[in-house]
Structure formats: C-alpha cells, structure tokens
Amino acid sequence: MKSHSSFIVSVSKRNNIEKVQETRITEKRSEQGSNHTHFDLRKSLVENLFVMLERAIIKFIDPPLHLSVDPNHVLCDNFGPVDELSPTECDIIHGSSSILSSLEGVYIRIGPNPQFTPNGPHHYFDGDGMMQSLRISKGRATFCCRYVKTNKYSFEHQVGSYIVPNIIGGMQDLGPFLARVVLYNARAILGHYDMSKGFGVANTNLAYFGGRVYALCESDLPYEIKVKDDGDIITLGRHDFNGKLTLNMTAHPKVDPNTKEAFAFRYWATRPYLTYFRFDANGNKQPDVPIFSMKQSSLTHDLAITQKYAIIFDIQLGVDPMNFIRGRHLISVDPTKVPKIGILPRYATNESEIKWFDAPGINILHVVNAWDDIDDDGSEVIVLVASNILHVEHFMERLYMTEPSMEIVTIHFGTGTVSSKSMLIDNLEFPVINQAYVGKKNSLAIQVFYSAINEKTPTKTSMRRTLGVVKLDIFASENNKDKHKHIVASRMYGENCFGGEPFFVARDPEDPNSEEDDGYVVSYVHDESSGESKLLVMDARSPSLEIVAQVKLPQRVPYGLHGIFIREKTFKKI
C-alpha cells in the first residue's frame, strides 16, 4: 500500500496524448453503415425510408466529429456497452459470513449503455440506462444486468434502430440537429413514436424515497424499477406522481434520513430556469416553487439540504437554444456570468424568502454534504462540502481537463459573502457519505466521506477512469500543512484495474451508537488485462481500506455512473 502522498502523485502523471485529444476527426464516417444500404425485409417500407434518410444525414450533413462525440472513441474498452444478463449466481471469492450478513440486500449501479452502435454523434451521457445489480441473500450473491425500459428504449428496441436524436451529442451543430428533429417529428406524426411518453434515457442515478426505487436522468421523469426476489430487475414505468411532476427532474434528489422526505428540482432552457419541489415521506409530490429570480439558464446537476434550508446553484454552464443560431453548442459556458448560490427554506411555498449569494469561481457539480452552523461572531452560516469544477469551459468537449476541486464552502448570512477552501485538487469525483448524515454535522471531531480518484488524463477515451478510492476527514487539523492532510485512508485498485463510484454501506444502521465510518465501502472494479469484473468490499475504518470480501462477476461491468444500496429489510417492503 502506497503512502497517501505517493498515492496522489502516482495518478498525476500525464500521458502524452494531449495533441490527440485536441484534434478533430477529419474523415467522414463513410465506412460506418456503408455495408448496410440494402433494405431490411423485416422492416416496413416507411421504416426503411427513415433508415436511409438517417444514413444520408450522417454521410452528407454531419460535420467531422469531435472526439468527445465520436462513438468509436467514446465507447471503447470498458466504457463500451454490454448485453443484458439474467440473474446469475456468482462466486464469492472471500468474505466472512458476518460481513455478508451486513451486506444483505442489493447494490445497483447505473450508467449509459447504448443498445445500438451509434453511427452519428454520440456523447457518453447519451446512452440508454443500464442497471448492474448484485443481490446478496443468505450467503449467496446473484448478479443481474438490465436496461431501464424507458419509452425511448422500448420503441427503439421494437424498431431495431435509433429513433430519438441524442440530447447532448446530437446538439453540436444546427443543420444536422434540425434534420434529425424533422425525421423524429415525422415518425411521431405517422404514429411511430409517442413523444408524450418521454424521450429520456434514465442512465444517471438511482434513488429510494416514498417506498419506491427510481432510475433517474435529468432529461426526463423518473422511471420506477423493482428488484425481484430472484435478483431480476424490472421497469414498472415512467412516474409522474399523479400528474404533479412535469417535464423532468434532477438525478440527485436529497433524502432526509430522519423525516424520509425527498427534496429535488428541475432546470429548463426557458423561464423559470429552475423549479424547486419536494416529496413527503409517502412519496407524494408537493407544489412547485418556480425560481423566477434565476436570470439565466443553469445546468444545475445537484442540490444540498440542511435541517433548515435547500441549497441550489446557478453556475456558468447553461443551455441556450439561441446558441444554434450563433453557431455554438446548445450547452455552453458564459465566462462573464458570476455563479451564485441560492438558499431557500426547505418548506418554502414560493421564492419570496430565497437569498442569493455571489460565489465567484464556484461551479458545483456534485455535493458531498451541507449543514447549518454558527460562525465565531455568532452569525448564521451554512457549510457546504462539494466538488467544484475549476475549468468548466472544458466540460463538454474535454471533460478530462475540468480539474474538479473538493472544497469546503461557507455561506455567511451576516455579511452576505461566500468563502471557500480547497481540501484537495487531485481529480476527486463521485463523493459519497454515510446517508444517515445527510444535511447535518457530525457531533464528533471528525466528519468523513469517500471519493473516487481519477486518472489525470485518459489514455483512449475522453472519460477518465477511476484508479482508487480515498477517505477524507473534513475536519482535518488546520496545523497540518500537508496538502493531503484530509486523506485518512486510501486504496488503489492495482495495475490496469479501474473502478467507479464507491458507495458506503453502514454495518448496522439501526445501532444508535455506531460511528459514522462503521461500515463498508463497495465498488465494482474491472481488470482491463484479464477482462474480469468484481465487487470489492472494503473496511471503511481501515487505514488501507482493506478488502474484506470479493465477488467475481459473470460478465464485464462498464464503469458507469452512480449507485445505491438497498437493505434486505427495505427490499422486502418495496
């Protein structure tokens, strides 16, 4: 096990591929689909016509693809899609019965996994949602891999080809995008696609609230899913909460561990640019609170809650339909915009009490946690721990250059100012905490969270791979001048082994005396040399995050995005 300093230094070595990442592909994808110009006799004449028109767009209208939306580049190696797999029993390589009993339930991670090989522009985030689940029960582990059966997935599966224009990759240039929209609308008019049933991909995150589990993506409504006793995963359908939820919803709702309420929002390209709302403990959606005081579009990905407030972010990354006319990407960065943080009472019924704070240089992507506090002068403050994108201008085309910084942000009510302190700038992402501490401060002298640590520069794709996991103490001693003082434990996955988001599972969540880090950190890890994937179970209290159990998985597990663990007791209630 390397020391914390050498651990960080080892991942900061850059590969000599900067020039490759910056260049554009200058050749048309004339080879793609060139051997498939004949009619498919299994399809109708109209459907074959649509396919021919799509190929014409690719050949004659699409510009040369940037590497960030070239499917041959984006979907290589373990970022590439896999097939569905029915429930399959796995080999538990090692792990005691007491450890396995603490993990009884189901761990699910979700991520983009296109069901068809894209021909046109395709961003990694455009892929259909695929769930990779591991059910542990009575000492046995069962793995399953299923698509979220969204409206988009189901219809395209029936037709056998892409139908819906990619939300991100397809919006790079006006001409090709309009051509695809015309084609898409033609299908809808002819009854080949029902737009009212949604067009999202449900590929970003999973959440449990109101007694239900949802697959989420911020381009659509949630899709309810269910894990069966045999480990299989089924999609129950798109959920609009009795007609009270419209358009879309964040993929990162926050659930209060005590009240069981969920707090969420949606953003849009037109006013109101952001709308806040919440769900009661039974999952009943409460009325919308439109935030008209937000003056510009913001691609707000996450929010935070405390015991008193909801915290929203107005960042420099936004969506502007006029960009098409200006010859820019739909999603772009406004460098002149001053980011803001909005503080709203959790139970607000309108935006009259919202307070906005200028937060220069703070573009929040993922939130670790937040809590209410008092400063040395006795004034009210909110402390926020989150991942800040230092170079947001690279978010769409050069994601590996965004350089996230894990920061402690303090919002001062008395002075109306925001201050921030960087804990670490070492490509830390996918932070997770013990979910029992959401929205509150630990009363002890420590407060910890876990984060994936990514390679500095990707070797083959525009997405960075995860080299290991670190445990950080937010309240590390101020007297310690080591730049890595907040790191209290770490583990690298080994040569040519890469993981994804870690997830914390408490050993005994019902024990009131258990400490915040009393539990396990779990993650899927893939060995690119052998092609094998495993679930690693690490002791969250060990200085080396010692591996205490491993499960060998029956097929490759792509790196994916976010996940959830649902305990057996909760599982039985769903």
Image (spheres, rainbow, N blue to C red):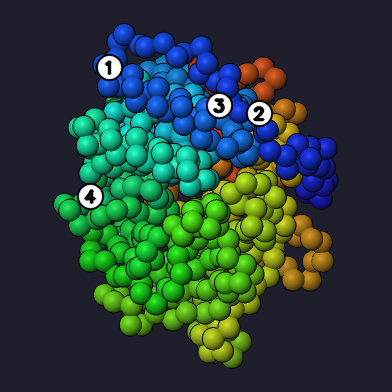
Name the residue that disc number 1 marks. Answer: 45
Label 1 sits on a secondary structure element that is helix
Point 38% across, 59% down: residue:
268
First in sequence, mark 4 or 1: give its number.
1
Residue 428 image point, x, y percent: 66, 51
Point 67% across, 33% down: residue:
25
> As shown in the figure, which amino acid type bears the numbered disc 2?
Glu
Point 24% across, 55% down: residue:
245
Label 2 sits on a secondary structure element that is loop
> As shown in the figure, which amino acid type bears the numbered disc 4?
Asp
Name the residue that disc number 4 marks. Answer: 240
Name the residue that disc number 3 marks. Answer: 80
Label 3 sits on a secondary structure element that is loop
Residue 321 relative to residue 48: left or right = right
Q: CA distance from mark 4 to mark 1?
A: 35 Å
> As shown in the figure, which amino acid type bears the numbered disc 3?
Gly
Q: Closer to the camera: disc 4 or disc 2?
A: 2
Q: Residue placed farthest to the left in the image? A: 242
Q: Residues within 10 Å of mark 4 (few under 14, many from 20)?
A: some
* Displayed quadrant of residue 311: bottom left
Q: Any mark on residue 27, and which?
A: 2
Q: CA distance from mark 4 to mark 2?
A: 44 Å
The answer to whether any part of residue 88 appears in the image is yes
Residue 288 relative to residue 203: left or right = left
Q: Residues within 10 Å of mark 3 (few under 14, many from 20)?
A: many
First in sequence, mark 4 or 2: give its number.
2
> As shown in the figure, which amino acid type bears the numbered disc 1?
Leu
Point 47% across, 63% down: residue:
298
Residue 351 image point, x, y percent: 33, 78
First in sequence, mark 3 or 1: give its number.
1
